[in-house]
Image (cartoon, helix red, strand yellow):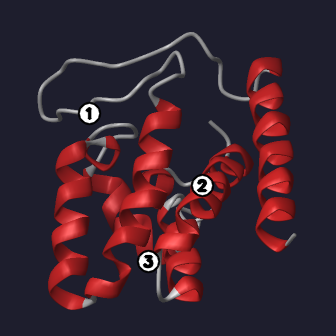
Amino acid sequence: MLNKTHLVITIFFILVFIPLVNSKIIFIIIALICSLIPDSDIKSSFLGKYKFFRPLQFFVTHRGFFHSLLFMIIGILFFLIIYPIGAFGFFVGYSSHLIADSFTKEGIRFFYPLKTNFSGKINTGSRIENLIFITFGLLDILLLITIFI
């Protein structure tokens, strides 16, 4: 899926879970950034275009290690050790990305390094993805209205 779709889906889950979180701004920032991390393994992605990620792109393939539960668990453990307050934000952002990509035709390898691929029928950038983007955008607006009213 495209970055914009990942972001509106993550915003939906942020709005669902924000009442449960004490450090709301930290939660929002970490969840949004972490929703884009799985695609940093390709040069054309929002984060992947930065030189910091270039060495990484040499060693990993797209929708491999970074699109797996293994990396998500490593990320959660990292946050729990280094910055525990950010662990839930990481989980929400990262898992929403993985779930969304599992509905695309390319799919993801949840249980990397196993070769089993979980995939759906959605083409990245297709009309159906645009419909998903619009739907989650409207849901985000509705949730915002209910939170503030």
User: Which mark identifies residue 10?
Assistant: 2
User: Which mark identifies residue 110?
Assistant: 1
Residue 123 placement, left or right of 132: left
Q: What residue appears at the point 54 percent right and 59 percent down from the top-left corner?
A: 36
Which comes sooner in the sequence, label 3 or label 2? 2
Q: Which residue lies under the disc numbered 3? A: 52
Q: Amino acid at mark 2?
A: Thr
Q: What residue appears at the point 77 percent right and 56 percent down from the top-left corner?
A: 143
Is residue 22 among what the camera can see?
yes
* Position in image of residue 65 (x %, y %): 25, 45
Secondary structure beneath dot 3 equals helix
Secondary structure beneath dot 2 equals helix
Q: What residue appears at the point 45 percent right and 36 percent down from the top-left corner?
A: 99
Residue 101 placement, left or right of 46: left
* Position in image of residue 123 (x %, y %): 65, 18
Disc 3/disc 2 C-alpha distance (Å): 24 Å
Looking at the image, which is closer to me, 79 or 22? 22
Which comes sooner in the sequence, label 2 or label 1? 2
Disc 2/disc 1 C-alpha distance (Å): 19 Å
